[in-house]
Amino acid sequence: MTDKSISGLYTVQFHTLGCKLNFSESATMERLLADHGIRRAKPGEEPDVCVVNTCSVTELADKKCRQAIRRLAKSHPGALIIVTGCYAQLKSDEVAAIDGVNIVMGNDRKNHIARLIEQWQADRVQPTMVDVHGFRELTDFCPSCSRGDRTRYFLKVQDGCDYFCTYCTIPFARGRSRSATIDSLVEQARQAAAEGGKEIVLTGVNIGDFGKNTGERFIDLVKALDAVEGIERYRISSIEPDLLDDEVIDFVAQSRRFMPHFHIPLQSGSDEVLKLMHRHYDTALYARKIEKIRSAMPDAFIGVDVMVGTRGETAELFKQSRDFIASLDVSRLHVFPYSERPGTVALRIDYVVDKHEKEERVAEMLRLSDDKLRLFTSQYLGTRRQVLLEHPARGCNVMHGFTDNYLRVEVPRHDELANCITTVSLDCPGNDVETVNGTIVAP
């Protein structure tokens, strides 16, 4: 075992909420604690440390964070309770007031978790230690390239955001846009390959803004990573439409390693609502990006973020949004109800959508999403695709994986094929709209 410098602590349990970036950073914190002799608690084992990595994208997210913190504190009364993430960053006093919380860490302190534990042990005077900087002080880039619970790695390439959309608190939770260097990211990708990694997802808050502080470009990062031997697949996580250059689309179209898969936030299909949101594009630009991708990669999976019920979204504007989205040749919608966030400019907009109407609009958009996903999936039934199979769950007689164009596939369990890219026949729809039943054709 690694020599311990954090006395009396042996096991840790993580509870992570929110985005892929949070999950990547939780895995990095777990590795940092392992370097100090603190391993992940086994099922049924009492943890010495509980870390809650929080989200604050909506009021519901805040509520789920509070519930998770209280549940862990009640279930493990002897554990050191650490809370970090966006909720901790934005509402540190509120988090510190929750019974059982020992340390509240800002987003820029995650890579210092071991040192903060040591400090808490050495200087414990107050019941709760709070180490949270203001958003203008969130200037450091904390690297993270960590393996998820399945098969893929998550490589953090960028953090922070300079957009300040009227409904969003992320710039206050994550700070200004900043990036790693291409050289450092290539080295992390090489390390992932050396560990047996086959797929890397590029993550960040606004990854299309990559290189703003380094003078480098996102397309140059993509090209450099494409040359790393051993990594079979890359996926680009959410990227703003105005920052998705045609050069990137064209490169992905001819790349063997970058998958035909894009996630492009839209938020609204109404130009008037986009202006109220202070988004940096209009529907015409968005439609051109979708057409460009479809022209270059007919098989590409295109996911779309949509927010409904925002302030100012009248019934007529919602219909405009719905009709525009229905016209797009996209694969799936990720639908979010608008949530009031304290301190945001959106609160100055007079028109408010009532809760019942908001729920109806969410349901309508979800139905549209299901229709689009069924249509996209149906094109590939009866075909063969390459699938990266994930490690099967314990006691389960099936396993899952994703095609190159992000169709989730279920096949009979073959443990020897976990973390392998395998030819699979896509036979028929699965038990839900998100899954296809398949048969392994060849390893």
Image: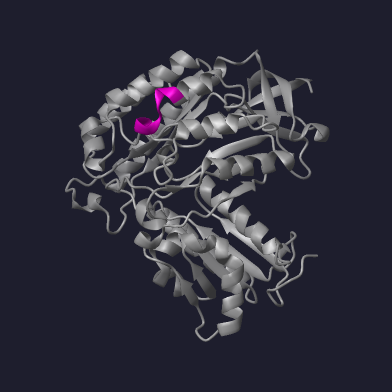
The residue positioned 54% from the left and 75% from the top of the image is 102
Q: Position of residue 194 (x, y in %)?
A: 73, 41
- Asked whether, in this view, residue 281 is left or right of residue 126, the answer is left
- Asked whether, in this view, residue 302 is left or right of residue 241, the answer is right
Q: Which residues are magenta?
A: 241-247
The residue positioned 59% from the left and 58% from the top of the image is 15
Which is nearer the eye, 412 or 257?
257
Q: Is residue 53 above or below residue 356?
A: below
- Asked whether, in this view, residue 86 is left or right of residue 313, the answer is right
Q: Position of residue 395 (x, y in %)?
A: 79, 43
The residue positioned 39% from the left and 43% from the top of the image is 212
Q: Position of residue 109 (x, y in %)?
A: 51, 64
Q: Is residue 204 above or below residue 2?
A: above
Among the 4 quarters of the image, the one containing residue 289: top left
* Circle count: 0
Quick one: quadrant of the N terminus?
Answer: bottom right
